[in-house]
Amino acid sequence: MNSLLLVTSAVSNGIAVFKPLYWLFGKCMSLLMEVLGNQYFLAIVIFTVVTRLLLLPLNVKQQKTMAKTTRLQPKIQKLQKKYPDPKDRNKLNEEMQDLYAREGHNPMNMGCGPMLFQMVFLMGIIGIIYYPLPYVLGIHGFNDSSQAIYDVILPIYQQITGNPDAKITYFQLNILENFDAYRDALMTNFPDMFTAEKCEAISVYRQGMNLFGLDMTAVPHWKDGIIVIIPILCLLTSLGSSIVSTIIQKKNNPAAGQQMASMMMMMLLMPFFSFYISFKVTAAVGFYWIISNLVAILQQIFIFKQYPPRKTQARLMVENTIERRSREENVKKIK
């Protein structure tokens, strides 16, 4: 997931195909902040929770598909023992397809739906976090003038950092972080975009990105004190999500223990990658990851409790038996 957040170049305004989604999410974010009194982080929490709730039916379906796959494992293993010779691979595949057809099961439906929708919603969230100036604050023409704006503020940024070779990363977030320093230059060079009204809106928006006294437009650094709590919480919540997911998958499919060992190693690497990346992006992005991880943990536990593997498998057996008998009765009527 985090790799998608690194597509931003110095003057990137997002991926063209997702810009309608950025616009839609931006309008929703703008409305939420208006209703919530410029409570930026509360709006992000609501966005994350709503996203997860919309994905809940797909995740429940995924859980049921996993339970059905687990229930069929003994039959699949029998077939594999029946055709151990690689020369009989085609016969094995045919009988497995017949098994899936009889059971009304498609193993290809394991998780593409939830992953696809998560990707779509993630891209929408990226729009409101990374590109707020045109999509949330409605600064028209900003995307077309991005390079010119970059060229104007770069010398100011280099003066701020004391580094004549410094380059701006995460362009729009950098503008928010250093807006007080950039304001006059932006109003002078781009008066149609950066009007007094829009500049005031940017300042208000930026104030909403202050959480418990922390400037969440800043990129965390070990030297900056308490703000390092954001990367640390990113690591802990991401580890928690990976561990909960691994435990649940093991209980859902105990037969896949050996495969789970290698998967767990990969799942545990991702939190440390998130930890590293959280020092490269603004604290607001890290906050979103923290909330997303916490909601994911709660959602996984909820689904597991509501649809425990054994009860789900038993329910599926009853449903499959009823369905099979119904098909048999229909065949008899046709004959």
Image: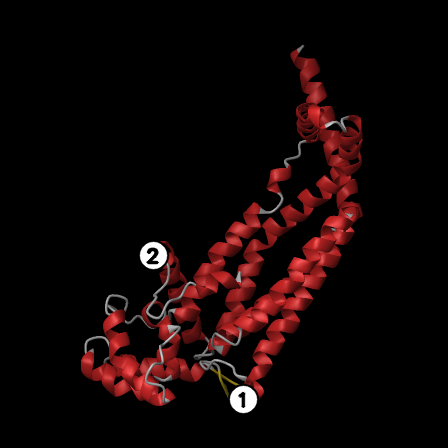
In this rendering, the label closer to the viewer, 1 or 2: 1
Instruction: Tell me where residue 270 sits by quadrant.
Output: bottom right
Report how many numbered discs are placed on residues in the image.
2
Left or right placement of residue 302 versus residue 19 in this view: right
Name which of mark 1 and mark 2 comes first in the sequence.
2
Q: Which mark is residue 197?
A: none
Pinpoint residue 327: horizontal percent, then vertical percent: 69, 23
| Residue drawn 62% across the image and 77% down it | 232
Amino acid type of the residue that numbered disc 2 sits on in the rendered structure? Ala
Left or right placement of residue 180 versus residue 243 in this view: left
Residue 112 visible in the shown view: yes
* Marks 1 and 2, how far apart at CA: 37 Å
Q: Which residue in the protein does label 2 denote?
A: 16
Image quadrant containing the C terminus: top right
Tag 1 and tag 2, C-beta contact below 8 Å? no
Amino acid type of the residue that numbered disc 1 sits on in the rendered structure? Lys
For label 1, the crowd category at 10 Å Cα-Cα, with few meaning under 14, some 14 to 19 and many 20 or more, is: few
68 vs 184: above or below:
above
Instruction: Tell me where residue 325 sits by quadrant.
Output: top right
Closer to the camera in the image, 262 or 24: 262
70 vs 278: above or below:
above
Pinpoint residue 154: horizontal percent, then vertical percent: 29, 80
Q: Secondary structure at mark 2?
A: helix
Pinpoint residue 209: horizontal percent, then vertical percent: 45, 81
For label 2, the crowd category at 10 Å Cα-Cα, with few meaning under 14, some 14 to 19 and many 20 or more, is: few
Residue 31 visible in the shown view: no
Pinpoint residue 244: horizontal percent, then vertical percent: 71, 62
| Residue drawn 22% across the image and 83% down it | 187
Q: Which residue in the protein does label 1 denote?
A: 223
325 vs 234: above or below:
above
